[in-house]
Image: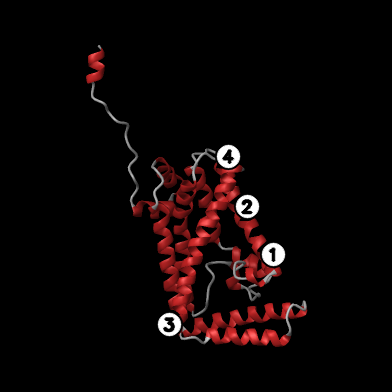
Amino acid sequence: MDNEISNAEFIPPEEQEELSFSDKLIGIITSPSRTMGQVAKATPNISNWLTPLIIFIVISGIATYLYGTNSALKAEMEEKSMQAIEKSFQDRIDKGEITQEQADEQKEKIMEQMNIGTGSKLVFQFIGISIYTFIAFFFINLIYFSFIKFLIKGEGTYSHVLNAYGLSYYILILQTIITIILSLAFNKFYMGLSLVNFFDVEMLSFSGFLLRKADPLLIWFYAVLGISYAKMFKSDDVKKYIILSFAVWILGNLLLYYLSTVSQVFSGFAM
């Protein structure tokens, strides 16, 4: 009997087949719950977050080039930037932080930077976007991982968070592509599908801040992100992960907006 058992053929358990790139790309958009459920059965894969991150950076670089070489879009973006800068300087003058002369000197330096050759400026912008995107990606995921691990008590690793956030990133890629198409089609700079596109408000005002976040694609991204976290951490309570996803997004952005009103250093992050 023992010999029969020892000689019996060992049949390994059925392994979960890895989804293809196209299956993940289409699945995260059309059926995120089912797709992430399948992804969660496999070992976390670096390509799940590195591929969409690189695609996002490349498309952002293409967008920077297209905007920078389109005269109408370039003029609009520079005008809005100067309006925001002048308002920021005026606020600092009113608070007594700087004098009018100091503000004028700083504005001249900014204007000189804007007049740098298009090619050189676009290269520096692309490098800046790449570095910022990578740093922000890992930092945001670290925040989510901390909340999931210590608040929700989720069973998983930082790699699980990276995989969930990375695959959900395809929705932000879609948002960027739509933004590029709309901006070039109408020769007007669009910010995704947010309501700020349809109202004449100051970009750095609180109303402008709220309208920028009222974007169906952005809301969809955070809903899918919550679902992805729940699946990667093998939780049946999807609702609490969706709530966490939106809570970190909303509270984090409110904090950045408040900091932008206190210090000019954070003004770019509140966009």
**Residue placed under numbered mark 4 in the picture:** 153
- Asked if labels 4 and 3 touch by Cβ distance under 8 angstroms, the answer is no
Callout 2 amino acid = Ala
Callout 3 amino acid = Gly
Q: Which of marks 1 and 2 is nearer the N terminus?
A: 2
Residue appearing at x 39%, y 48% in the figure: 45
- Asked if labels 1 and 3 touch by Cβ distance under 8 angstroms, the answer is no
Residue 218, by quadrant, is bottom right
**Residue placed under numbered mark 2 in the picture:** 247
Q: What element carries label 3?
A: helix
User: Relative to 12, does residue 35 appear above or below in the rendering?
Assistant: below
Query: Is residue 84 in view?
Result: yes
Image x and y of residue 75, in percent: 53, 84
Question: Crowding at label 3, few (<14), some or many (≥20) Cα neighbours within 10 Å?
Answer: few
Q: Which mark lies nearer to you, 3 or 2?
A: 3
Q: What element carries label 1?
A: helix
Per the model, the C-alpha gap separating discs 3 and 4 is 49 Å
Per the model, the C-alpha gap separating discs 3 and 2 is 40 Å
Q: Earlier in the sequence, mark 2 or mark 4?
A: 4
**Residue placed under numbered mark 3 in the picture:** 119
**Residue placed under numbered mark 1 in the picture:** 258
Q: What element carries label 4?
A: loop
